[in-house]
Image (cartoon, helix red, strand yellow):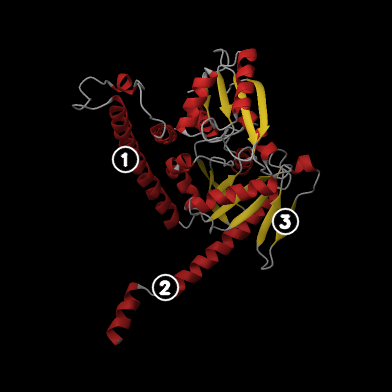
Amino acid sequence: MLERRGGGDSAVLVSLDFGEINHAESLNELIHLADSAKVPTRAVIEGRRDRPDAALYAGKGKVDEVADAVSATGASVVIFDHDLSPAQQRNLEERLKCRVIDRTALILDIFAQRAKSHAGKLQVELAQLEHLATRLVGGWTHLERQKGGIGLRGPGETQLETDRRLIGRRVKVLKERLARLEKQREIQRRARGRAGVISVSIVGYTNAGKSTLFNALTRAGAYAADQLFATLDTTTRRVHIADYGPVVISDTVGFIRHLPHALVASFHATLEETVRADLLLHVVDGASPNREEQIDEVNKVLAEIGADAIPQILVLNKADLTGLAPEVHRDQCGNISTVRVSARTGEGMDLLRAALGETAAAHRRRELAADSRTPTATGRAAELRHA
């Protein structure tokens, strides 16, 4: 866990360009991630390489440059904008004489700060432990002191084996608790389904304005801020859409490129609202020059969690920053595909509500048509008798 501002912690950021198109955007995100973690940046070191170094990730000369920056600024941690192997992390810490973490560990740290609900805290702890399990390469990790090691160690067990066993035991407990919470949410979803209420999930790249849009639609007062991962815990509200009726809208955690797989897996309970939704409002920062890449990154995560087949309405947010008027676009079949709005000023929100109502009504008609084509139990029994 990183120390916070006021505690004297500060960072040197390292970002290497391997010829990727979005290198500059990735570095900008790393700076914002460090700021979101409340760790001030003292220096940024960049470089170009064909491939990562097996031992140090960066070349020896670049690592010496990082060491000089650490010495000159007094930074206490070096943050790489890449995933480091356990061996690379250990080698870098020995060479730099300070803590070294990668992008995944930084994101996990931010999630640990932001988790407020019981489920959110369990999910973050699970992701952190599963990440830590890959970092156990020997030595004394003090886990047994936190858990009461006396009496826990098996005969002939090494410290590494003890640590792995303690982590495995805690991971099992966390998964069981999350499974129980998931069952509770499934009961709630079934109740909404029986009542004929469709479920809408707001998804999108982090800091695209999802929570601001959620508040504009529901007047829920959910926390919204100009920072990465301002929202972590899913918030759900029932709202009335004119000319249609009630719908349930959920605000979910934002996505980002290189989102840790352990985090996606651990947040299965939270992302379940997205997987089970009838409609996705895919919020995009319409003012971002990288919006197309961000759309692709979100769609990749949606595919990873099995939500890529759910109908989407693309919501181009922040129209007030682009100077473009709110409008609605339809696809070749006449279905609403895109709505341009400004959640902050409220421009175009009437268009989005109307689009929600139209799409919800079309969904209900499809469900009713499907139900009418499904034989009833009585009808199936009669068919069997005649056969």
Distance (Cα) linking label 1 and label 3: 45 Å
Residue extending farthest to the right is: 323
Q: Which label's residue is closer to the chain start, 1 or 3?
A: 1
Residue 323 sits in quarter? top right
Instruction: Please tell me which residue is depicted at 56% across the width and 50% down the height of the picture.
Output: 300
Residue extending farthest to the front is: 60
Distance (Cα) linking label 2 and label 1: 36 Å
| Residue at the disc numbered 1 | 176
| Residue at the disc numbered 3 | 328
User: Residue 41: where, in percent of width, then height?
Assistant: 64, 21
Instruction: Please tell me which residue is depicted at 69% across the width and 67% down the height of the picture.
Output: 332
Q: Mark 2: which secondary structure? A: loop
| Residue at the disc numbered 2 | 374
User: Residue 204: where, in percent of width, then height?
Assistant: 60, 45
Which amino acid does the dot numbered 2 rest on?
Answer: Thr
User: Residue 287: where, in percent of width, then height?
Assistant: 74, 42
* Labels 2, 1: front one: 1
Label 1 Cα neighbours within 10 Å, binned few <14 / some 14-19 / many ≥20? few
